[in-house]
Image (cartoon, grey):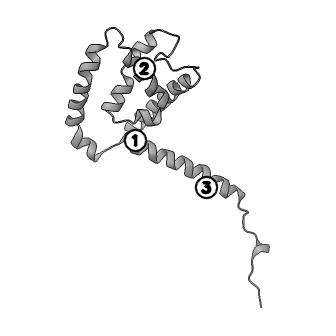
Amino acid sequence: WERVTTNEVKAFFSYLESLLENKTEINGYFIGQSMTLADAALFNVVQSLELIAGLNVKGYYPKLYENWEILKASNPEGSAAYLNVFPGFAEYVTQANAEGRAKGFDINTYWAREAFQNVLEETVQPVKEATPAPNESDDESVEV
């Protein structure tokens, strides 16, 4: 279930990253120049996945991380309680799950392996396609 879930997160975050890449300016908002329902709904995703799941959001999704930092710095109305309390909650959850996580799934390791596997497949496949298949005329053995 963890791989399926992280692949869904990856697809969603990749979509958000592409939205931000297409903007002329990263301003803390996904749409326009002021807070929208989309911004409010997504306010906690970066910090949640960083602090609880341990995802390296800044490394994988730099535009999304930058957008979060700008929005957080603007201190939107009603966000102070979340910004002050959530890190403590996340630390508690992380510590409570530390033993189980040490034995199990790590999102960054999984994504790194997946990326390596993709590069490997992209490299090996063209080599396989470019390598001619052996045929009988290439046989260097001589019958006596």
| Residue 97: quadrant of the picture | top left
Q: Residue at x 41, y 33 (%)?
A: 57
Give the left or right position of residue 1, taking residue 98 as reference: right
- Dot 1 falls on a residue whose secondary structure is helix
Which residue position holds label 2?
Answer: 70
Earlier sequence position, callout 1 versus callout 2:
2
| Residue 58: quadrant of the picture | top left
Which residue position holds label 3?
Answer: 124
Q: Residue furthest right?
A: 137
Q: Residue at x 48, y 45 (%)?
A: 114
Q: Residue at x 47, y 28 (%)?
A: 13
| Residue 128: quadrant of the picture | bottom right
Earlier sequence position, callout 3 versus callout 1:
1
Q: Residue furthest front?
A: 73
Q: Is residue 1 visible?
A: no
Q: CA distance from mark 1 to mark 2?
A: 24 Å
